[in-house]
Image (cartoon, grey):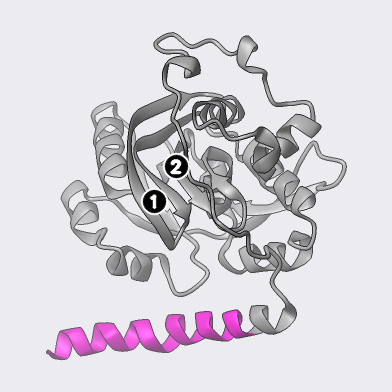
Amino acid sequence: MNPLPLATRREGSSQCVAQLVKEAGGKPFFGDSPAFGTARGVAKSNGYLPLIEDLSLPIVEFHGKRYETDSDRFSHLRLSKEAMDADVVINLPKVKSHAQLNLTLGVKNLFGCVPGKMKAWWHMEAGKDVNRFGEMLVETARTINPDLTIIDGIIGHEGNGPSGGEPRDLGILGASADVLALDRSMVDILRVSPDLVPTVAASQRLGICPEIAAINFPLQHPSELTVEDWKLPDNLVAIDFGLPRVMRSTFKHLYIRLIEEPMSIYVGKSG
């Protein structure tokens, strides 16, 4: 079985899922293609190394490859070959407000499978049109086509996220084989209009977003889990990155990857 990538941002959920995958005979790995530095550097700076060592997870650097899509507007997308080649992809997003997109859920989380500097390029190429950016994220999610998305809303993140928000106890955990249906359900639970979330709005325009009435809820219906007064960002900021910002980002990436991270390893060994 090919290794199974965990598209995640949270140590607790990734640890539990990785352990269950191993118990089922799978081979999970920790992978990333960060905008700055390397996958190992990101794992270290975010405190993942103890988890990785405890579960003996390989650290894999994502590499990009072009893949055909069914979209008229995005005929090809450059995505992580390692994620696309995996037998199973489990997507582990958080429920959080976001100053660029109002709210990010399962679809947006899969943007992490876009190779490092391609993320900045998409911000520059599609970011001037929020509708186009939302469609790009939806087509990315459709092409990756995760086998399972488990969305963590036990503690959500509301307000001026992702860096300036506040935690909020929600006590919600959702799972589905259909990431679009799961995102649609979460905006209903949070009482956020789908029109305010570019990824959900894009899936509706494309005619691939199921209506709530068409979704099967074996445990609890969204109407039973309604969250009152979920806080969206006070003000949205621009999605697009100008060329100077992309250039600075590229130089920063090279500096961290080629100088800062190697030097930190050298200093650590010397000390």
Name the N-terminal-most of marks 1 and 2: 1
Compared with residue 220, is residue 102 higher up or lower down, i.e. above or below?
Answer: below
Q: Residue at x 28, y 26 (%)?
A: 24
User: On the rendered image, what quadrant is the N terminus found in?
Assistant: top left
Report whether 74 appears left or right of 56: right
User: On the rendered image, what quadrant is the C terminus found in?
Assistant: bottom left
Q: Identify the residue position indicated by label 1 in the image.
A: 9
Report whether 74 appears left or right of 98: right
* Residue stretch in magenta: 248-271
Was residue 147 drawn as part of the magenta stretch in this picture?
no
Was residue 249 drawn as part of the magenta stretch in this picture?
yes
Whether tag 1 and tag 2 are in contact, CB under 8 A, the answer is yes
Compared with residue 5, is residue 249 higher up or lower down, i.e. above or below?
Answer: below
Q: Identify the residue position indicated by label 2 in the image.
A: 93
- Count the labels in the image: 2
Q: Picture quarter containing residue 13?
A: top left
Residue 66, position in %: x, y? 71, 53
Q: What type is the residue that disc 2 sits on?
A: Pro
Compared with residue 253, is residue 30 higher up or lower down, i.e. above or below?
Answer: above
